Amino acid sequence: MTTPEIDLRSDTVTRPTPEMLAAMAHASLGDDSRDGDPTVARLEDIAAQQCGKQAGLFLPSGTMANLVAILAHTGRAGEVLMEATSHTLTSELGGIGALAGLFTRPLPGHRGAPDFDALRAAVRRPGIGRNRVGTALIQLETSHNHAGGAVLPLALMAAIRGLSLQHNVPVHIDGARLFNAATALGVGVDVIAQHADSVNFCISKGLSAPIGSLLCGTEEFIENARGYRRMVGGNLRQAGPLAAAGIIAIERMSTRLGEDHATAKQLATGLAALDPSLVDPAAIETNIVRIDVSRSPLDAASWEQKLGSVGIRVGAYGTEKQLRLVTHRHVDAAAIDRVLEEVGRMLRR
């Protein structure tokens, strides 16, 4: 009997549920970019309501959602402030500069949270004055990918929102895993989103839909964003089936993310028991486990290869000394036990 593969590379590997597939098979097939599609419209309304915003926009990916949000807020002018290891800076291929034509100001931070004093010193009123480019946008990320799924404290977000209002600078939240952040905090996603003018979240990660992200904000902002979505090639035609899966993702799958957080904690605790230098379980807030293999005799690529040979897929991350493991609904407690058993065997060798 073949042992099932365990894929911990990302929560983007999640498959649609049977309920999603059934809904997709019977979804409307309107042209969302021409006359509109009722299923897409319903998905956008649900997303906006969840986030406490006026309107929503369905886009193919989180990277595009961030780019469109940045364009809609700035009009390709000014400087964007964000924490130095934000996904937009590290993993979106420089689109903010190459496509949006914007300057960026990377800010120091801790576990993905920008240093407030540094942010306060950097923010300037929009426009050009005193030979300086004004601040066009402040962008936050929660949960924070590079920081191992860390969640921004609500008090910090509230303080940044106050600063933004003082200077009349909009705030955008890259909330690719927004529902994970809300689950970790024990609040609704609207409690997080209230601290920003716009927010996006992915339905194709732990929420298990096949494709898509939602961008939410005011009606005027979203109407503007629709134009930029067309500009960057994100218009969707017969998107009803994708939207049907997205509705179930939000309404059903968002309530089970605590299970993924529990398996991530189980994984981190087990790894620390094998070797305390690998990970600090106390740092695990959501479903991402960053492993430090710098004290291991094997580099990250070797860990990836050796675990892959026994049917456990992991990903080297950033450097040869880091791994990123992400839990999701296809990885249960028994699967984590098997991962720990194989890692223990590998370390003993």
Image (tube, rainbow, N blue to C red):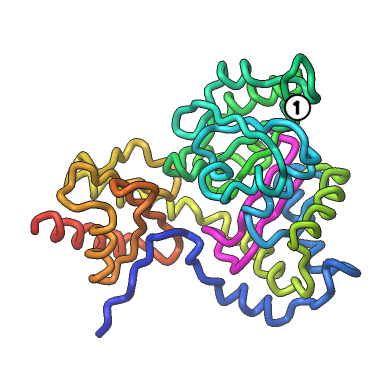
Task: Look at the image and say whether residue 344 sits in the magenta stretch.
Answer: no
The C terminus lies in quadrant: bottom left
Left or right, 218 with reference to 174: right
The N terminus lies in quadrant: bottom left
Q: Which residue lies furthest to the front in this view?
A: 131
Q: Residue at x 63, y 54 (%)?
A: 62
Q: Which residue is drawn at 68% across and 52% down?
A: 65
Left or right, 281 with reference to 238: left
Q: Which residue is drawn at 23% across and 57% down?
A: 340
Instruction: Tell me which amino acid carries mark 1.
Output: Val
Q: Where is residue 75 in the image (x, y as percent from the top left)?
A: 81, 40
Left or right, 180 with reference to 157: left
Q: Mark 1 points at which residue?
A: 169
**Crowd rating for badge 1 (residues with CA inside 10 Å; few <14, some 14–19, many 20+):** many
Q: Position of residue 145 (x, y in %)?
A: 48, 45
Magenta-colored span: 193-216
Q: Which residue is drawn at 28% across and 67% down?
A: 308
Task: Look at the image and say whether residue 209 sits in the magenta stretch.
Answer: yes
